[in-house]
Image (tube, rainbow, N blue to C red):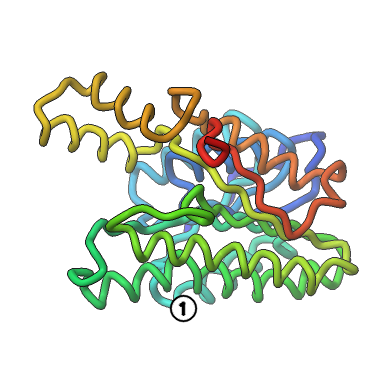
Amino acid sequence: MSRPSPGAAAGGALAGRHALVTGAEAGLGFAIAQALAASGASVAMHCLHTGQAARDAQAALAGAHGATVLLLQADLRDAGQVEAMMRQALDAFPRIDILVNNAVIRHFEPAHELPRAHWDESLAVNLSAPFHLARLALPGMLAQQWGRIINLSSVYGSGAAANRIGYVTTKTALLGMTRALAVETAAQGITCNAVAPGTAPTPAILERIAEIARRTGVSPQQAEREYLAARQPTGRFVAMENVAALVAFLCSEAARDITGATLPIDGGWTAA
């Protein structure tokens, strides 16, 4: 575990709040951690490996915003490691006020070829880990009658595509869990919402587009255009900073009456 960087960001709508973001080393998770730190929150960044890239991300976040930034390592396939990570977070912070379940694992096989291990780890990372983190964060939220739980679902939480059965199933189930937690905590000052992004330029998506370009022999630019045209009417990526801004808004007092909701941010994908 890395030592927290000194000092919390001064001021901001989330000053004095403590957040835990899973999968925060890069991509969308890092953008969300950055938005919360910019709003004044202290941030625990979960990473699968606390290597140099994770330490660089921690230093960048702390340096840019003067925030207290904790770096935590856990394999979310292992419930014991999830629980140990939360204990480490609560050793450093008095409680977790804001929980953002962002980490995800994807496999691209048809159902009849999907290895059992791939199914099991999809359930563990995409669904069980968010539940365990929520149940462990809730006592502190209930004690102070304030909390924010935000689950990153997907456009595939309300639709489907071939060869993604683990991803589609878990992202759909995450919406049910969001609603159940929202109803259970609605009178205790806690909100629980889901954000459903379309295609954002995350490292995993960029690598997938690059692989399509290699396989089909088209340019990376053409592969990107075709990939997005088949999904989002805007024809462009959903900006990660815009998803992060939506998450930060859901953590604000202005969003206290939004709970149990699924908010799409998908360039018109689900409307088309």
In the rendered image of this protein, does residue 72 appear above or below residue 223? below
Q: Which residue is drawn at 44% across and 39% down?
A: 27
Q: Residue 217 location, x and y as percent? A: 9, 27
Give the vertical position of 175 relative to 116 (above or below): above
Q: Is residue 26 shown left or right of residue 21?
A: left
Q: Quadrant of residue 250?
A: top right
Given residues 23 and 44, the one toward you in this image is 23
Question: In the image, 49: left or right of 64?
Answer: left
x, y percent for residue 164: 33, 58
Which residue is at 44% across, 66% downward?
169
Whether residue 22 can be seen here: no
Question: Toward the viewer: 267 or 258?
Answer: 267
How far from the left and from the top, in percent, is residue 107?
Answer: 28, 59
* Secondary structure of the residue carrying numbered label 1: helix
Label 1 is placed on what type of residue? Ala
Residue at the (44%, 23%) spot, across then down: 235
Residue visible at 52% across and 35% down? 272
Give the answer, above or below, for where 158 lies relative to 27: below
Name which quarter of the figure residue 229 lies in. Answer: top left
Could you tell me residue 78's position as x and y percent?
Answer: 40, 76
Depth order, front residue of 225/61: 225
Visible in this render: residue 127?
Answer: yes
Determine which residue is flagged by label 1.
Answer: 79
Number of residue marks: 1
